[in-house]
């Protein structure tokens, strides 16, 4: 009897020892897992930068927001729950009222191509402003002629006649008018999910991308969007071109005035056109007697890296090219370039633009062209953009929430989805990641019909270290969700 009791005690002690050891093992494993989780994605740090802005003494963000709500249009919106008061900028960086530095991964598409406050562009603007700020079209000035000559030299074929405007909207409105005058046909075709501006004609052509607004015009028609990710025909560009052909055949008189298209859709969510679409669409448009208008407002000026203009990568030469935003590096400037034959139609309508081509604006634009060449910004967009896209694709392999990575050069899109199979837009998650990345020091844009696409469009001086910091910040934020 005593022997059996002793044996039970020994078994209980042994069992307790085993349980204790297992508990210790589990505890050690948990500590290792916790340590691994904490160290797997490190908190990223901004790359070093040798510039500090002067102390800011102006109104606070709260004061500006109060005045904005009281006196500016309620249609104006801002990014982030707590909007930033940006008071200084240098190259690819921006600074808020407290002197904090942010990596600008979006401002390139908004206006800046060469980088904020590039000294060569600033000098050109100041020098011209000190001479004469504005002279009407009735007098001669070398600034407009010199820039027109330089700009025409960057375009293929007979595209060498330039009309200057003050914005992309004005440029596209003028292009649509030229197409209608030249062909004698009022019908215009654009793509669904496109964005071409915010005046009456361009809003009609804008279709669906810009939230829910567009102005309905009977003479504007919207073809199926050749979207490789969400489009009904996937990456089959020929099928989308057939839809364009059917739209013209059955939705119009069979003839059109023009077809306007972005080479990469910007506001629509950095959507690349399906392979083979643009050459096929070009042939369809020509057969219908229309002019092909290439909207290069966002994709132009070396942004795609491989080419200076986005349409060049598709192997087509447009009849009309429109441009703005990066053309002036922040200065309000736009342009329409076409052939001498097509340009002649405007002599029938006495067209003029009071401020388009003013000496200060064209001096800024000419300086931008020189900086792009001098600083090899097209090559930089290709090299850094390729590296950035590769790293973003690696992030896609890591996180299911990233449904697609697309674009070229320094015009890239990252689409977030709740379900990869259903492609359910992750709109709330996109806003959350944007806010968190801002807190880490990265300013990034968003777009797309559902507002779930990050628009990565930095100034063309973006470095590889900047690209790595951006991806690391996104990686860190996604790891904490």
Image (cartoon, grey):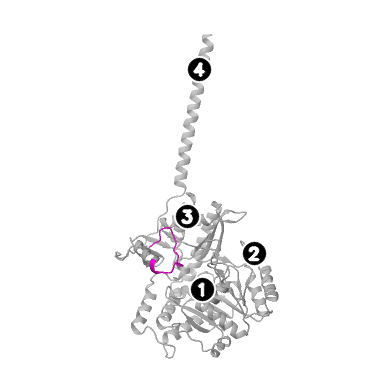
Q: Secondary structure at mark 4?
A: helix
Q: Are marks 2 and 3 in contact (CB under 8 Å)?
A: no
Q: Could you tell me which residue is drawn at 51 percent across and 78 percent down?
A: 171
Q: Are marks 3 and 4 in contact (CB under 8 Å)?
A: no
CA gap between label 1 and label 2 equals 30 Å
CA gap between label 3 and label 4 equals 58 Å
**Residue tagged by mark 2?**
235
Dot 3 or dot 4: first in sequence order is 4
Q: Secondary structure at mark 1?
A: loop
CA gap between label 1 and label 3 equals 28 Å
Q: Which residue is at the far front? A: 70
Dot 4 or dot 1: first in sequence order is 4
Which one is nearer the viewer's eye here, 6 or 477?
477
Foreground: disc 3 or disc 4: 3
Dot 1 or dot 2: first in sequence order is 1
Neighbor class of circle 2 (other Cα within 10 Å; few <14, some 14-19, many 20+) is many
Residue span colored magenta? 70-84
CA gap between label 4 and label 1 equals 85 Å
**In what quadrant of the picture does the N terminus appear?**
top right
Which one is nearer the viewer's eye here, 184 or 138?
184
Label ID, residue 198: 1
Image spot of residue 325 (x, y percent): 47, 73
CA gap between label 4 and label 2 equals 72 Å
Dot 2 or dot 3: first in sequence order is 2
Dot 1 or dot 3: first in sequence order is 1
**Residue tagged by mark 4?**
10
Foreground: disc 4 or disc 1: 1
Q: Secondary structure at mark 2?
A: loop
**Residue tagged by mark 3?**
432
Q: Is residue 179 above or below residue 307?
A: below
Q: Is residue 415 left or right of residue 133?
A: right
């Amino acid at each position: 009897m005593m022997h059996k009791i002793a044996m039970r005690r020994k078994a209980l002690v042994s069992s307790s020892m085993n349980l204790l050891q297992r508990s210790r093992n589990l505890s050690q494993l948990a500590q290792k897992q916790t340590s691994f989780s904490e160290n797997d994605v490190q908190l990223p740090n901004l790359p070093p930068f040798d510039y500090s802005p002067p102390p800011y003494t102006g109104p606070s963000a709260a004061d500006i927001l109060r005045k904005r709500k009281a006196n500016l249009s309620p249609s104006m919106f801002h990014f982030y729950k707590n909007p930033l008061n940006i008071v200084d900028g240098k190259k690819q960086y921006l600074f808020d009222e407290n002197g904090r530095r942010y990596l600008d991964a979006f401002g390139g598409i908004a206006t800046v191509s060469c980088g904020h406050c590039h000294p060569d562009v600033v000098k050109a603007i100041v020098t011209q402003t000190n001479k004469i700020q504005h002279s009407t079209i009735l007098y001669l000035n070398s600034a407009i002629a010199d820039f027109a000559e330089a700009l025409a030299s960057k375009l293929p074929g007979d595209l060498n006649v330039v009309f200057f405007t003050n914005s992309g909207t004005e440029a596209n409105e003028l292009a649509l008018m030229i197409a209608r005058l030249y062909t004698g046909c009022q019908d215009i075709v654009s793509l669904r999910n496109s964005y071409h501006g915010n005046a009456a004609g361009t809003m009609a052509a804008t279709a669906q991308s810009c939230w829910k607004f567009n102005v309905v015009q009977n003479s504007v028609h919207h073809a199926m969007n050749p979207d490789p990710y969400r489009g009904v025909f996937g990456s089959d560009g020929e099928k989308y071109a057939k839809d364009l052909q059917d739209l013209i055949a059955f939705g119009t008189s069979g003839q059109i005035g023009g077809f306007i298209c972005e080479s990469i859709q910007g506001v629509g969510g950095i959507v690349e056109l399906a392979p083979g679409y643009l050459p096929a669409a070009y042939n369809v448009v020509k057969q219908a007697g229309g002019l092909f208008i290439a909207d290069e407002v966002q994709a132009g000026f070396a942004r795609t890296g491989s080419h200076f203009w986005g349409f060049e990568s598709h192997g087509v030469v447009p009849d009309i090219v429109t441009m703005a935003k990066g053309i002036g590096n922040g200065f309000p400037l736009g342009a329409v370039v076409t052939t001498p034959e097509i340009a002649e139609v405007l002599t029938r309508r006495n067209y003029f633009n009071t401020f388009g081509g003013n000496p200060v604006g064209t001096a800024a634009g000419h300086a931008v062209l020189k900086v792009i060449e001098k600083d090899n910004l097209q090559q930089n967009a290709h090299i850094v953009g390729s590296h950035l896209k590769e790293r973003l694709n690696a992030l896609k392999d890591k996180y299911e929430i990233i449904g697609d990575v697309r674009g070229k050069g320094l015009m890239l899109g990252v689409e977030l989805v709740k379900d990869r199979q259903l492609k359910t837009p992750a709109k709330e998650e996109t806003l959350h990641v944007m806010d968190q990345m801002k807190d880490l020091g990265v300013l990034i844009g968003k777009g797309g019909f559902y507002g779930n696409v990050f628009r990565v469009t930095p100034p063309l001086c973006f470095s590889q270290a900047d690209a790595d910091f951006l991806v690391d910040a996104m990686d860190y934020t996604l790891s904490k969700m």
